[in-house]
Image: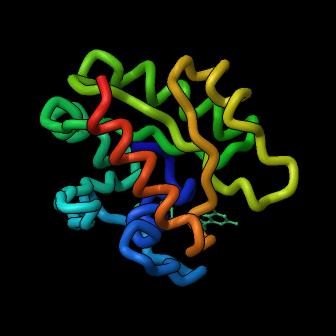
Amino acid sequence: MGTCGVGKSSLVSLLNGKVESQVSTPTIGLDIKSVQISENKLVVWDFGGQSRFKHMWGDFLRGAGLTVLVCDSTEENLKKTKEIYKRFSRSIGSKIIAIANKQDLPGALSADMVQKKLGVKTYEMSAIRTELMDRMKDILEYEINSD
Ligand SMILES: Nc1nc2c(ncn2[C@@H]2O[C@H](COP(=O)(O)OP(=O)(O)O)[C@@H](O)[C@H]2O)c(=O)[nH]1
Ligand SMILES: [Mg+2]
């Protein structure tokens, strides 16, 4: 979950070894993709960021095994991401982690700074760097398997 354009769909593509084209199509509603991690198949629900679909998020969150809050590591987006988190926190029935995405961009906030603001364990990532696919898989595998 996260606001529009932070790289949620790009992160799903990264997990599948692809780099989403720079002109990516916005996700409409919900996009469901499967990702192979070790011997497990992970089903990823990629939430559309448009506000008209947000009423559905609560129900999806209640059914999730791990919630991943994605921000683009800018001050401005961090505020919006925090608002989303507050708005839906009651519906989150799973462990939650955050991704400080777009670390390749100059001035990107560190995971530590994002973590302090959100109060959620945060990892740095750059969805456009294919060499980070295994790192992203490791993060999810670790978080899903640990309490
Ligand atoms: N520089 C940079 N651009 C990214 C990164 N992740 C995604 N993008 C770009 O940000 C835009 C929005 O990405 P998208 O995955 O569609 O965002 P979503 O709306 O959250 O699904 C696209 O142009 C992506 O190529 C990243 O880590 N670094
Ligand atoms: Mg998307």
Q: Nearer the viewer, residue 51 or 3?
A: 3
- At horizontal 49% and vertical 78% (from top left) the residue drawn is 20
Please tell me in which quadrant of the rendered image residue 58 appears.
top left
The single residue placed furthest to the front in the displayed view is 39
Q: Residue 130's x, y, as percent?
A: 56, 75
Q: Identify the residue at image location x=32%, y=56%.
A: 46
User: Relative to 41, does residue 2 appear above or below in the rendering?
Assistant: above
Seen at 25% across and 54% down, the residue is 45
Q: Quadrant of the N terminus?
A: top left
Viewer-closest of 106 and 6:
106
Residue found 54% across the figure and 43% down from its top? 99
Name the quarter showing ligand 1.
bottom right
In the picture, measured across the screen, residue 108 lies left or right of residue 96, that is right
Question: Quadrant where the C terminus lies?
Answer: top left
Can you give x and y, in whole percent of width and height, for residue 72 in the image?
Answer: 64, 49
Residue 39 shown left or right of residue 20 in the figure: left
Seen from this angle, which residue lies furthest right? 106
Query: Please, which colouring scheme is shown?
Result: rainbow
Against 137, residue 63 (above or below) is above
> Residue 143: horizontal and vertical position, in percent?
36, 36
Picture quadrant where residue 13 is located = bottom left
- Image coordinates for residue 135, horizontal then vertical, percent: 52, 57
